[in-house]
Image (cartoon, rainbow, N blue to C red):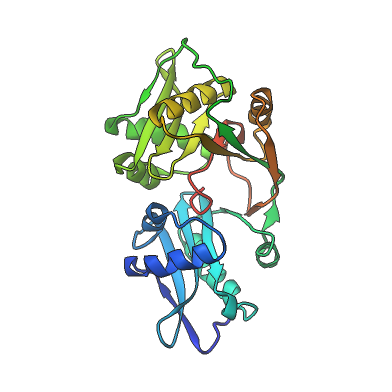
Amino acid sequence: MRVPDDLSIRDAMLDDMPAIGELRLAVGWTVHEWALRIVIGVAHARCVVAVDTDGRLAGVGSGIAYGPLGFIGNMVVAEKHRRRGLGSAILGAVIGFLDEAGCRRLELNATSDGRPLYERHGFETLGTSATARIPRSAPTSPDQSFPVRRATGDELDQLVAFDAARFGGDRRPLLAALLADPGSEGIVAQRDGVLAGYAILRLDAPRVGPLLADDPTVAEALLREAFDRAPNVDALRLNLPPGNRAGSEWLRGLGVEIEPWDGRMGRGPSIPRRDDTVYGMAVGALG
């Protein structure tokens, strides 16, 4: 799609983060500065902005490549520039980057307003996801049959291998950044000395995600540990993909109200993955 004559598209810079944050806030989204830093000025991701002749931001979009799997996010067009084809132009630039990076499968989280745009670009709804706000008072109990503890920096290779086989893509740069960030804390669970799940707790948000576990028992232990490490947090939110039916049943067993959501969309051939082990995304823009 052609960019309107009074606008141009360029790569985002870190100096653009305040203006990008304003665009996100304008549509009711959290800014997530740490997540923006992960897609700006790095080889494995691209964030583009549309600017007017005075340099004001008119729109933004990003894509991050995880080997065969790419995630699209941060798709916002300022209200005065909507219905001019700008969203399509931004999306095209992001898809072009992910295609060149070798991503065969592209996924994103769509709002109801954005869905028609993505459908025109070949994306289809993947099914009904489950989101839930889990209160601290939920009847979770740690399973003493396997240890849960803080992750260490030298476990990155092990976490990347565990994650890739289940998530479907290589998230090494993302996991490395999260483990090194003082605003987050990694938690791991082992069964018989073998990694059975992990979670990343964001201490500044607060939130938990990614969270991957081989079964609901492991997920519950990781969640309980996250609450223990964030004593002032009243609730944590999880986002389960359409394929994690066992996870949905586990949440119902805890008496947690599940919110169905059909915004997850994808394009391209399926890839080897285990959605039944994914209990929480990092954020929508990063998968």
Vertical arrangement, residue 111 with respect to residue 130, above or below: below
Horizontal side of residue 185 vs 139, given as left or right: left
Q: Residue at x 42, y 63 (%)?
A: 46
Q: Residue at x 55, y 39 (%)?
A: 237
Q: Position of residue 124 (x, y in %)?
A: 70, 55
Q: Position of residue 98 (x, y in %)?
A: 49, 60
Vertical arrangement, residue 116 with respect to residue 216, above or below: below
Horizontal side of residue 266 vs 184, given as left or right: right
Q: Residue at x 43, y 54 (%)?
A: 32
Q: Nearer the viewer, residue 182 or 162?
A: 182
Vertical arrangement, residue 78 with respect to residue 94, above or below: below
Q: Nearer the viewer, residue 97 or 195?
A: 195
Residue 19 seen: yes
Residue 274 seen: no
Vertical arrangement, residue 19 with respect to residue 209, above or below: below
Q: Position of residue 61 (x, y in %)?
A: 50, 66
Q: If the image is split into quadrants, where does the N terminus sit?
A: bottom right
Quadrant housing residue 91: bottom right
Q: Residue at x 46, y 49 (%)?
A: 66
Horizontal side of residue 240 vs 25, given as left or right: right
